[in-house]
Image (cartoon, coloured by chain):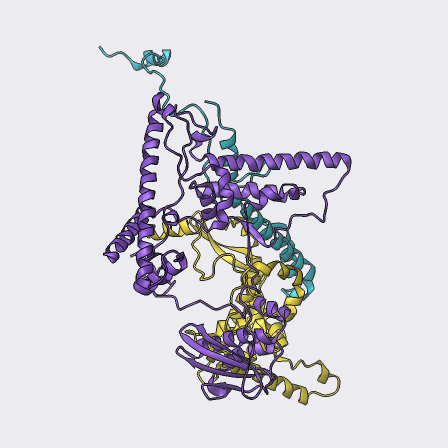
Amino acid sequence: MSFLSRLAVKSSGFSCIRRMSVYPQHYAEPVVQKNKQIEQKSELAKLHHVPIKAAVNKASDTVFHDDTKEKMVNYITKKGNSALARSLLSKTMELIKRTQTEHMNLAKGDDKDKINTNAETLLKQAVENCRPLLQVTAIKRGGVNYQVPVPITTKRSYFLAMKWLLEAAREKERKVSLPEKLAWEILDAAHGQGRVVKRKDDLHRQCESNRAYAHYRWS
Amino acid sequence: MRVPSALFAARGRAPQNEADVPFQEILPLRLKNTVSGKADSGNDVACLQEMGVLFACLKDNEFVEKYCHKEISQFQNCFKCYMDRKFEAKKTINQGIVQPGNNLNYKQLNKYMRRYPNPL
Amino acid sequence: MALRVFSLNLVKTNRNLLQNGFKSPAPPTGHMAPAASFATEVTVQAAPAAVQKQKVSKAMRAYLKRANEHDEFMKTQHLEFQIGKRHLANMMGADAETFTQEDVDEAISYLFPSGLYDPKARPAMKSPDVVFPARKAAEFDETGRPFHSLFYTGKPNFFQLLHDIVEETNKLADLEERMLRRGNKPDENQKLEIDGFHLLPKDQLELLLVESIADIEYSNFCNSMDRLIASPYAYKSKTFIERFLKPLMDQSNQLEVPKPKIDGEGRQYITTYECLRKTARADVTVRLPGTGKISINGKNISYFEDENCREQLLFPLQFSELLGKVDVEANVEGGGPSGQAGAIRWGIAMSLRSFVDQEMIESMRLAGLLTRDYRRRERKKFGQEGARRKYTWKKR
């Protein structure tokens, strides 16, 4: 072990961070979307002499590509079977679309226009509604475990929201398929109801009741 | 014959002869030119006031977030600023850049003291 | 006989290479020119008779002895190299007088075919000047008194360089202040352009200085150079700075774009061989006036069952807006569907360079389409559950 770490130190110059990436450190991340390339034109002009990493094998620049969907696929995936996860999510989107169109057709008059039938925006809305603001961490002080409310980063809040949605969808009877349940949960959450939104509110309540310990945190 | 101890106690205990206990300089009588980084984990409590305001608002509105947009955005901005500042500070410290100011990191302090060591 | 002498030279060369293993061979001629300023002739001449009579210090005597030995050694090496070259030329049936180093390399790779992975480990026959790194000349006179004031730092050239950099920086700072007083501003037109350059890497700096330097010393060099370059009047000491800059390669012009060929039907086509990704390997042909036909191993796009893989195939075509305007033929073998799709994607992107303008090539490069993906499956490690994951730790 010591030999390995020494090697790593030697190769990486002065920093002792062991890099695992195949690409050398000066390689830049690719910018796959063309509109993003136009957006960041001035920054990208500096990359004229910098080699770029290869685009990953799920990158694409189509209208069907959506970052939230990609992330969701990653969380659904079990044991690397992302093809299955992708098909499950697309089935979910289809179900959402179907139910929403049905609702729209049943509705009368002005309500018809109010119903959102775009599955992607509904998914985004659902995730946005489930994002927590805070979380509690257990901190041990004087032999007593305190539940201390801590602010969380944006990235983690998105992760928690998607994880909760999936956990709610996986808690089901055997007869119901995952896409069905996930579609229900997403639709519920998009309208600000359902178990996941309640879970978020519960977490906020717990944070509020433990607000006295907020100054305890150090990590 | 037994002498009652109260007789001696009245005079108090005689001081020790200084010659018997010569002074030894076990550790150098000088401050070291380094500080240890152990206690320098830093205080991580940030945005307490914003959090308090947010909690008050949430409690008033039965935990419905849409009535507390202002408080939420304030709280999140505060945390984001805090994280950015922390990241920047870490970067400068890791590069070993010493900035003027009174709250220096242990690495910066060590660098500073190496430049101006205690006179021998 | 010929082979004997020749192989003797080879063996010796290899042995000496081993001995000097820690020093890398002399750099290409490009970097040798500025090295002259650091007083590094290979050796000095043996001491003149007048000096020999005088009292000579021990250090100087030892140095002279070493220098003489080195001279002798180099002389024999040169001689042997010349003889070896003549023999080699005879063996190859070429004229010994006009036998160049390139011919030597070719002959060696022909006579001693080697499958060794590292090119440095393969048999080679090179001029002794290349094989044995340059040495520092004497740094002190015959009484043992050093020439250089920084001799006792052990790295006089390096510290002299730092000294010079700081002097330049101070000069520029003075200039800046004077100009400020006069109310002049630095000339924007002359501003130093360092976008396409970077500082000499550590190993090259070491070769330039003929001294080995520590990592922290190199970082000191970098910091002081950065400070010098950051000055608004840096263009005033352009010649000084340029000695320590190395041009970066223009990434999108790095590989030459091949000219399309014309096939029997009068269509332009480009074939990219050896498109690799994971363990897959593909040959991709793109034909320009086309109808968007795709054939992979004789099948159409349904060769890939996975939706994602199909999307990958179309990605470069869609990105360069040539979808439906070119035909693609690919032969692919090895690997799984994802690797095969990746290999073909790279092949299509590389071929399409011939049919789009320079701006689009740069755009494709920025999107990461023109980079060969070298990532492979990471091996499992012993004592771990997988490549990175550790076993669950249980105290007892």
Q: Is residue C184 above or below residue B120?
A: below
Q: Colour of chain B?
A: cyan
Residue A98 visible? yes
**Quadrant hosting residue C288:** bottom right
Residue C114 visible? no
Q: Nearer the viewer, residue C330 or B99?
A: C330
Q: Is residue A207 above or below residue C131?
A: below
Residue C96 appears left or right of C182: left
Q: Is residue C89 above or below residue A113?
A: above
x, y (%) of residue A118?
64, 80
> Which residue: 51% across, 45% down?
C33
Q: Is residue C350 above or below residue C4?
A: below
x, y (%) of residue C236?
66, 41
Residue A156 appears left or right of C176: left
x, y (%) of residue B99?
59, 39
> Which residue: 34% across, 47% down?
C78
Q: Colour of chain A?
A: yellow
Query: What chain is colored purple?
Result: C
